[in-house]
């Protein structure tokens, strides 16, 4: 204990350093005593934070690769926490400045997602538990206008107005979207702060939406999430890793993505009126969607992924899955009209006179917004009983660029 | 008010970093390790995670981790950059009055054989004494480190918005008694 450990080169290692710190503080002038105590603690962790050693039962060390053909955070099994941050470029932004911003943020994301402190990270220790952190970038119309006029996809614009919309500007639009997800909320908060610190001289904050699913470990990973209506939500999603998923999200010959390995992200903030939903009995709730609350099975089936039978009728001759049911309305005749949803619940502070401000951050990935998302939304706008309890209040569309390679940055293909 | 708040934070960080530096440099003195064979010198040092504090004008500082890949100590005698006509190598030490102060490092930075020197806010750093133009976040600023054998090591640092690292240089004058002299 008292013998300093020495390595082959005769360097004194940590044991001695610790005592030296105490000596230093011991020699500090009077009045520094309290600080010294604090300093000793900080000093003990001031060395470059090493990669976390996996601990049994701990998921903090989990990482998702940042570099790759496609961005992380899309096919990644949804984490427990997700924050969506929309930024606006400051007036007069040049392509060079946007490039610098994207380089900085990509560098931060590359470090933080791998459990390393970002450059100039003032809370380096918070970076040591990545907990499957992903940072996914989306480019809004404003950013594409600056860096590549005419190079953005035709669908990169606000969605058409829908009759059910009650959009508020606080949750709409944005030049640059950062989707930050991890299984740990502290990790998400740290990554968000680091990215915003590096954005501040380039952008202003437009909106932030913070959401959650079940905590890590509560359920088997990959379990379809439940929303705050208690519904199993997202059963129709194609499974990441399948051909169907790749086609829906990253396109094919028929519906190509805007750029290879790119996709699109539509973020709709959907307010769910829980107080009104309370008035509905269980069978009414199940009929509104056409699925059972117990396990998400279609009302004509027994298991979640059973194919619904839209022709089945009840003893008095009415369809078991009603014409107005969400399941029937959302399901396309044309199989190309499919989307991949990677949403999160939100539960904000209730306004005066209310006991809830809850809903869904409906995040939808698809190769082409106009050909996949919009037709579905049109049908739901025309008829969907669920519209009685749900109201879209925010809407934003982003072009999601491909991933990048080490040494590159997200969006670098647009600067060549 | 503000200064009193900043002071203890700076002190804690500076002391923490200083302790590490002291550890890494134990047993070496700048004078005892003046030379590195010229043939090795180009690869003698590597600089990782370099960054510069963004600033509109005046002073700024550069940070990062300098590693010595050789079996002999390497001494950096000076640094230069197009961003500032005057550059100094600074250390942060405890003054006689118990406050942390920065000052030019006599003899330069010594990187121990197979060791490293961390340049951090509140500790050793490369001080840009007067910016010739603004350093903006994301800017890429080149630096040349001149070694005691006359060779040069270059690196490029990224501009970062950073509200810490507010150490101002007292210009070698007698430190003012107030803790704010090290701010």
Image (cartoon, rainbow, N blue to C red):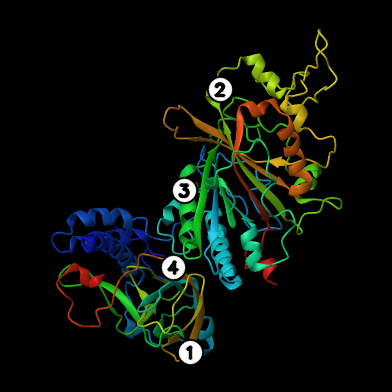
Q: Mark 4–mark 1 contact, CB under 8 Å?
A: no
Residue A160 image point, x, y percent: 70, 46
Q: Residue at 45% x, 26% y: name it.
A: A355
The residues bearing labels 4 and 2 have C-alpha atoms spaced at a distance of 72 Å
Circle on res. A8: 4
> Marks 3 and 1: same chain?
no
Task: Examine the rendering and report whether any part of residue A411 can be seen.
Answer: no
Q: Residue at 71% x, 41% y: name it.
A: A340
Q: Tell me which numbered mark, 4 or 3, is placed earlier along the sequence.
A: 4
Residue A297 image point, x, y percent: 72, 22
Query: According to the image, label 2 marks what residue?
Result: A276
- To which chain does the residue with label 3 belong? A
Comparing A185 with B137, the one in front is B137
Query: According to the image, label 3 marks what residue?
Result: A189
Q: Mark 2–mark 1 contact, CB under 8 Å?
A: no
> Marks 2 and 1: same chain?
no
* Circle 3: element type: helix
Circle on res. B151: 1
Q: Mark 3–mark 1 contact, CB under 8 Å?
A: no
């Amino acid at each position: 204990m008292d013998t300093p450990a020495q390595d082959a080169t005769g360097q004194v290692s940590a044991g001695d350093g610790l005592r030296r710190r105490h000596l230093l503080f011991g020699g500090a002038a009077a009045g520094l005593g309290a600080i010294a105590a604090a300093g000793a603690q900080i000093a003990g962790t001031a060395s470059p934070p090493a990669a976390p050693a996996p601990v049994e039962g701990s998921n903090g060390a989990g990482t998702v690769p940042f570099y790759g053909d496609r961005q992380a955070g899309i096919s990644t099994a949804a984490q427990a926490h997700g924050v969506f941050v929309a930024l606006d470029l400051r007036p007069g932004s040049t392509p060079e400045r946007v490039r610098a911003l994207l380089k900085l943020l990509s560098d931060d994301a590359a470090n933080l997602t791998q459990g390393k402190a970002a450059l100039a990270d003032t809370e380096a220790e918070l970076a040591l538990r990545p907990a499957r952190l992903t940072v996914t970038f989306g480019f809004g119309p404003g950013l594409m206008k600056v860096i590549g006029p005419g190079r953005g996809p035709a669908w990169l614009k606000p969605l058409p107005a829908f009759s059910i919309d009650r959009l508020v500007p606080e949750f709409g639009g944005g030049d640059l979207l950062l989707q930050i997800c991890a299984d740990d909320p502290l990790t998400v908060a740290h990554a968000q702060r680091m990215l915003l610190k590096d954005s501040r001289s380039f952008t202003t904050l437009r909106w932030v939406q913070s959401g959650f699913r079940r905590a890590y470990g509560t359920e088997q990973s990959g379990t379809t999430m439940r929303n705050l209506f208690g519904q199993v939500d997202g059963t129709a999603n194609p499974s990441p890793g399948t051909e169907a998923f790749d086609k829906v999200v990253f396109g094919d010959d028929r519906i190509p993505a805007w750029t290879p390995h790119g996709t699109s992200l539509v973020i709709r903030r959907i307010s769910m009126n829980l107080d009104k939903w309370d008035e509905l009995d269980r069978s009414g709730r199940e009929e509104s969607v056409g699925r059972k609350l117990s396990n998400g099975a279609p009302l004509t089936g027994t298991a979640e992924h059973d194919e619904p039978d839209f022709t089945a009728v009840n003893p008095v001759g009415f369809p078991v899955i009603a014409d107005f049911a969400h399941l029937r309305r959302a399901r396309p005749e044309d199989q190309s009209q499919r989307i991949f949803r990677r949403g999160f619940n939100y539960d904000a502070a209730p306004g005066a006179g209310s006991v809830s401000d809850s809903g869904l951050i409906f995040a939808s990935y698809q190769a082409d917004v106009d050909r996949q998302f919009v037709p579905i939304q049109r049908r739901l706008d025309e008829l969907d009983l669920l519209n009685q309890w749900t109201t879209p209040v925010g809407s934003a569309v982003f072009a999601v660029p491909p991933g990048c390679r080490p040494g590159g940055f997200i969006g670098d293909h647009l600067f060549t | 008010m503000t200064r009193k708040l900043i002071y203890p934070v700076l002190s804690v960080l500076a002391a923490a970093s200083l302790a590490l530096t002291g550890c890494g440099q134990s047993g070496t003195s700048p004078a005892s390790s003046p030379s590195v064979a010229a043939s090795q010198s180009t690869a003698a040092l590597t600089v990782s995670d370099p960054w510069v504090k963004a600033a509109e004008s005046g002073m700024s500082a550069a940070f990062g981790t300098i590693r010595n890949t050789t079996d002999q100590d390497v001494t950096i005698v000076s640094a230069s950059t197009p961003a500032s006509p005057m550059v100094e190598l600074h250390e942060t030490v405890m003054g006689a009055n118990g406050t942390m102060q920065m000052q030019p490092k006599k003899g330069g930075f010594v990187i121990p054989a197979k060791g490293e020197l961390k340049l951090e806010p509140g500790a050793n750093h490369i001080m840009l004494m007067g910016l010739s133009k603004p350093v903006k976040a994301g800017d890429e600023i080149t630096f040349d480190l001149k070694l005691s054998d006359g060779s040069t090591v270059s690196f490029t640092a990224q501009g970062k918005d950073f509200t810490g690292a507010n150490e101002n240089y007292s210009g070698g004058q007698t430190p003012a008694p107030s803790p704010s002299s090290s701010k």
